[in-house]
Every structure is written in C-alpha cells, then in structure tokens.
Amino acid sequence: MELQPNDTQKLIQDTARGFARDRLAPNARMLDREERFPIEALREMAGLGLMGINVPEEFGGAGAGVVSYALAVMELAAACASTTVAMCVTNMCAELICQFGTDAQRKRFVPRLTSGEAVAGAFALSEPHSGSDASALRTTAKRVGDRWVLNGTKQWITSGAHAGVMVVWARTADTGGRGISCFIVEKGTPGLTAGRHEEKMGLRGSNTVPLTFENCEIPVDHLLGNEGDGFKLAMTALDGGRVGIASQACGVGRAALDASVKYMKERQAFGQPISEFQALRWFVADMQTQLSAAEMLTLRAAWMKENKLPFTREASMAKVFASEMSNRACDKAVQVHGGYGYIDEFPVERLMRDARVQTIYEGTSEIQRVVIARDLYRAHDARS
Ligand code: CAA
C-alpha cells in the first residue's frame, strides 16, 4: 500500500480541499442553524466529479478509485459534515447500481446521480423497528403482473425528501434475510411519501425523513440484482459505506484538532498562550496520534476495497475506531475551548454534535464489533 497519494488521488484531494474551503466552510454554520439542505453545493460537487468518485467515467463518474474517495470525504467532512453525508450516500447508491445493476439500469440511473440531476441518492434499509437487525425489515414488495407493489415504512432516510433516485429494500418472501430484495425507486412515484424532517442533534443540514410506501408501484425491471439477494447487496454496500463514514469521522476529528491548536495558540492564561501548558499539549498529542491511526486504518480499508481484496473486517475496524476517535477529539476540543467551546461562535460545538451520530449510523459501534469478531473467529476456524 502506497503511503503517498498518486497523481489522481492528489487531484481529487486538492479539488475537494479547495471546494471545502471556498464553498462548504463558509456556509456550514448557517446550514446547521437553519437546517437547510445544501442542494446547490451538492450539484456543484457533481460538476466536480465528486458524486461518483469510484464510478467508471462511462457512467459520469470520476473513475478515481476508493482511496481518492476516502481522501475527498476527509477534506469535505472537515468543512461540513452535513453536506458530506449526502454526498457519501449518493456515491454509495451510484456504486451499488453500477455493481449489481443491469446495463439498462446503469445507463439510466447512475448518470442521474453522478451529474447532480437527481440531487442526491437515498439508501432506504432501516425501518422503525429494524435498525441493527436489518434482516427483520417488514416492508413488502409483491409482484403483480409487470409491476412490483411496495408497502411499508422506512426510517432515518438520509436525503429522503430530495433524492431523485433511491435504493429500497423490501421483503419478497417470508424467509428471513434470504427473502429480501432490493429495488430502485424514483422520487415522485405515486404511493411514495416523505414524512416530517427529523430535528436532529447534529448533521442538521442533512435531510432525514421517514418514507412511506402505500401501494407504490414500480416497473418490474427496477429490481436491483436477483430476487432474494437484497440482504447481500445491503451488506456489500454497507462495507463500502463504512469506509465513507470512517473518512467522515477522520475529517471531523481533524477539524476539531485544527480548531484546538489555533485556539490554544491565541488564548492567553496566566501570562502565556494556553498551548504552553502541558495538560493541553497532551490533549493535542493524543488527538493527533489517535486521528493519524484512524486515517491509516481508513485508507487501508479503502485500498483493500480498491484492490478487490476482502475488506469487511477492515471497513468495520476503520469505522468503529475512526468514529470513536473523532468523538473523543471533538470532546477534547470543546474542553480546550472552555466556555467558548459550548457556544456556537466557535465551530467545535457543531463538530461535537455532528460527530455523535458517527458511532450510530451505517452500523453502530456494537455492530461493527460483532462483524469484526465474527470475521476473526471465521479466519481462526479456517486456519485450524
Ligand atoms: N458482504 C456480503 N454478504 C454478507 C456480508 C457482507 N459484508 N455480511 C453478511 N453477508 C451475508 C452472509 O454471508 C449471509 O449469507 P447466507 O444467507 O448465504 O449465508 C447473509 O448475508 C446473512 O448474514 P448474517 O447471518 O451475518 O446476518 P445477520 O442477520 O446476523 O446480520 C449484521 C448481520 C452484521 C448484524 C447486519 O444485520 C448489519 O450490518 N446490521 C447493521 C445494519 C446497518 O448498518 N444499518 C445502517 C443503515 S444505512 C445508513 O445508516 C445509511 C445512511 O443513511 C447514513
């Protein structure tokens, strides 16, 4: 694994860094305060190739690989995690359709995601009663002639009210995980309704809604992958998605560290900048060490995915570690800022609120540990 980015990776990283600095950072506080979904920024990101970084160019993607994707997400999330989560889920949907779609599905839906025409993609797996236990989902899809008819409710759907293209999981048979299938659903399909926007602790610029399907009819060729393979599609997509969340966590944690160092060098106490106090030096030294380790784990998982190696365990390790270190860094950053860390004039209180969900969505820390331990036992059994 190369430790230095190659030319393509550097180009994507620089593009994301410039966009984050010029377009995302100035608006992040306003989006958070006003709970405003960043439609314009998402379209501009599509124009820069950031909505399909690991998607082949023939479908409008940048074809730049998974390491480029991780590097870009780190840059963007440091400026605005709300915008970045919508970007991540869009990339995830585009990749999933590329990987499992028919030629017709790829040509029809992927360019809409990568070009910004669809604004964003949405990933509709969770339901009110099934989050961690994803295979317990109850939404149904029944085949009626040349249509699939969907009924049920999805919960916590990122960009759900705005996404032009969604991937939706539903039960096509009563056989547990093996009875789940995946479908592509377009915004505006009769029978599909987005519910009330959730007022969240953080990521307040990101749109989060329930989706209701009431006799929602979609064409039969909107089935993605084979009937009954939906759960495996979800798990495959989530492996990649977890690299994205780990990257977001690295970006947010890094922003908290940068803000802390800046503040410590400016703030005076007892006749000197507070950066001179050993207690605070230890804070930033630990933050730097932990975040560097998180970045290495994340880039390793990205590199393994890019090189088509099994990376389920590595993605979960990156996600659990990066999200926990990001939360730790944000908490320390608030402490470093004292009272100023608790008000919205400084960015660290928003960073702390934005970081909190990282140990929850795309699989809680507890689920990541389940995945890691299972894979470890499997590898052990295979050796003995
Ligand atoms: N890749 C491919 N296939 C996989 C897989 C993977 N990583 N993991 C499991 N599978 C397959 C298994 O091989 C098995 O196949 P067979 O039936 O052929 O044997 C099948 O899937 C079932 O596997 P498990 O027995 O391991 O399934 P389980 O019910 O025990 O669940 C779980 C495993 C890891 C707990 C899973 O349910 C899970 O990841 N839960 C968390 C769900 C989650 O992350 N939700 C996030 C919502 S999306 C989101 O947050 C997006 C957003 O908007 C930000």
Image (tube, rainbow, N blue to C red):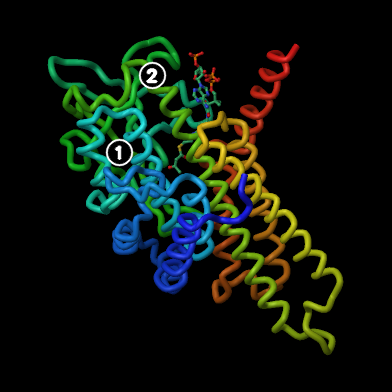
SS category of the residue bearing label 2: loop
Which residue lies at the image location 41% right of the left edge and 26% below the top edge?
Answer: 233
Q: Residue 205: horizontal and vertical position, in percent?
A: 41, 59
State how many labels appear. Answer: 2
Q: Point out which mark residue 277 bears.
A: none
Amino acid type of the residue that numbered disc 1 sits on in the rendered structure: Met
Q: Point out which mark residue 229 bears.
A: 2
Q: Is residue 72 left or right of residue 145?
A: right
One can see residue 105 in this view: yes
Mark found first going from the N terminus, 2 or 1: 1
Q: Point out which mark residue 166 bears.
A: 1
Please tell me in which quadrant of the rendered image residue 4 appears.
bottom right
Amino acid type of the residue that numbered disc 2 sits on in the rendered structure: Asp
Q: Which quadrant holds the C terminus? A: top right
Say above or below: 86 vs 364.
Answer: below
SS category of the residue bearing label 1: strand
Q: Is residue 120 left or right of residue 259?
A: left
Q: Residue 84: horizontal and vertical position, in percent?
A: 44, 55
Q: Residue 42: horizontal and vertical position, in percent?
A: 33, 58
- Kindly give the residue lying farthest to the right in the view shown: 278
Q: Which quadrant holds the N terminus? A: top right
Which residue lies at the image location 53% right of the left edge and 43% below the top edge?
Answer: 243
